[in-house]
Each structure stands twice: as structure tokens, then as C-alpha cells.
Amino acid sequence: MLRINRENLKSSHQLIWFVIDFVMLGLLIVNLTFIIWDSIYNFIAVQNLLRNYVPALQSAYHPIHERFIFYDILFVAVFLTEFVVRWAYSIKAKIYDRWYFYPFIHWYDLVGCIPVGSLRFLRILRVISIIYRLHQYKIIDFTDTRLFRFVNFYYDAFMEELSDRIVLKVLSGVQEEVRKGSPLFDRIQHDILFPRREMLSDWLSGRVAMAAREGYVPNRGALRAYLENRVDQALKQNHELSRLKYLPVVGPTIQDTLENAVGDIVANVVHQVLEDLASTTNHAFIEDIVNVFLPDRGHAPSEPEENEALIRLILEIVDAIKAQVKVKRWREELP
């Protein structure tokens, strides 16, 4: 239900103008209702229907219908008076840079006052402007009304459907350009990615370091035990090493020592690699990898297989974006 915020109305410095807005809003609604009713009454079939079933109403309204222009001009006189008063106030308050800007900005108020059938309905724009102004100053709030939620829901649904179709059309065009051998991916590589190699290196270095710290450091003991166990199993399945146990006296000892040493070496190597990745020292390594994928412009041209792989990568990325665009979020909000 629409409610008037009386506190904001009283505390505002434009109380008189808001009161005028409410009065004009009421007059506009009455005037538009009058125009619509007279337009319906203008049909002979409607006049005959009223004459047959409601003769008192027909006989009372028919003289008003014949002088419709006169009564409409009475409303127009009030609207023009209010228009001139607001224009004068805008000049006095210097709301606009030039005194003659007001009628151009509020052209619909002026054109709607012309007593011509098709132009009269422009007065509904004046109703919308008054309601918007009252809503903007928080005198009234339409967001809690069922009408607003209904209109806003279908407006959002319409805009989502429209924007999705446009985006899908554009993305399909991009895919078609790439399939035809467009230099798009070369431009992406040389004009977009290549100048940002340092930024990509820093970003990848930070992401790798964070992944190593969060994934490895807390699970260091479990990973070491897993590696030693796997190395121990692999060594036991090796036929050459298994023959050591046949050596007299020292065979089993040598075998156990070798298994422990190899397991310890492997675990220490993996530990050191992950420690390096978890620190800032990985930057040079990541930078070398980025330089391999994004060589200088003077580098030898890519092989056809590499170009095909890059084309497939771009197409798959665009397909993933299109799949996400096709998700209709407004359907999830259906009551």
C-alpha cells in the first residue's frame, strides 16, 4: 500500500511545492479520466447504450460532452498557470543556466496543454514526472507496492532477455571470426597480453605462492609420509633392489638403508620445491613460463598446431561465457 512519509514532507524545504504537486496530481488524474471517458462516450454505440439503460446519466453528461473543449480548457488554464509559476521560480532560484531552459526541459508539460486529442495524453508524462519527483525526495515510496514489484520484475525479465540475446549474438560473431582465421587471437596475444606480461607474472606468482602455502604447508607431514610410503612400495617392487637382501649379513641392512635414503631424498626435494613455490622466489620461474607463452614480437611464428590450440581455447572460453549468459536469473525469482 502506498503511504506518504509525513516526516520527510514536513522536514523538507519545498513543502509548498510538494503540496502543489499533490494538487496537480489529483487534477491530472481527474482530467485524464475525463478525457478517456469522453473519448469512449464519443462513440454513437456507447451513447445509444447509455440512452437505453442509463438515460439519466446520458442526458446529464451529453451537454458536458458538447462543451468538452470548454471544460478541458479550464484544466489547461490551471496547468498553464502552474507551469508559468514554476518557470518564474526556476528563473528566480537560478535552477538552470539560462532562463529559457525550463520550457525545453519540461516540454511535455507545455505540449500536453494543447487541446488536441493526441497531444492531451502527453499529460500522463506530467503525472509520471510528479510521481518520480515525490519518490526521489522520499515523500512517497513505490518500491513496497505490488504494482511496482510486478512491473519491476517483468521489466528486469525483459531487459535480461534482450541483453542476453545481444550478448549471445556478439559472442557468436566473435567465435565465427576466430573460426575464419581472424587475427583476433594474435591481437589478444600481442596487443593485450604481451604488454601485461609483468602484471601476469606478478599475479600468477602470488596465486602459486598462496596455493602452495595454503595447500602444502598445513599438510606437510601427511605429504611427507605419503611420499615415503609410495617410494618404499616402489623400491620393494624393484627386482634389482630386492636382490640385495640375498647378500649375506649386510644385505637386509643395505636394502633398508637405501629405501630410507631414497624416500628421504624424494621427500626433501618435493619439500624444497614447494617451499620455493610458496615464497616470492618463484617469481623468476613464473616469469620464464609467461615469457614462453608470450614471446617477443620478433619470435618465430607459432606452429599451426599451437594456433589451433589457441583457437580452441578461445572458443571454449567464449562457449563458457555463453553458457553463463543463457542462465535465466529472472526465472529463479518467480513466485
Image (spheres, rainbow, N blue to C red):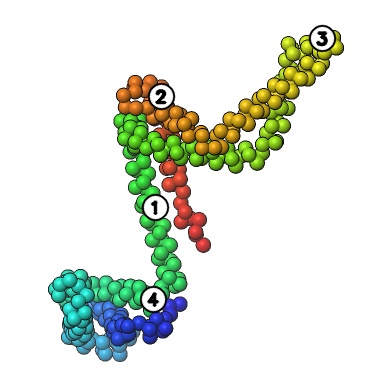
Question: Mark 3 to mark 1: distance in Å?
Answer: 79 Å
Mark 1 or 4: in front is 4
Q: Residue at x 51, y 62 (%)?
A: 335
Q: Horizontally, is 245 left or right of 294 in the view?
A: right
Residue 149, given in percent of the width and then of the height, sits at 44, 67
Which residue was labeled with disc 3? 247
Question: Mark 2 to mark 1: distance in Å?
Answer: 37 Å
Whichever of callouts 2 and 1 sits on the residue coming sooner in the sequence is 1
Mark 3 or 1: in front is 3
Which circle marks residue 138 in the picture? 4
Question: Mark 2 to mark 3: distance in Å?
Answer: 54 Å
**Residue type for callout 4:** Lys
Mark 4 or 3: in front is 3
Residue 272 vs 99, above or below: the answer is above
Q: In terms of secondary structure, where does tag 2 sit? A: helix
Whichever of callouts 1 and 4 sits on the residue coming sooner in the sequence is 4
Whichever of callouts 4 and 2 sits on the residue coming sooner in the sequence is 4
Which residue was labeled with disc 2? 306
Residue 321 vs 48, above or below: the answer is above
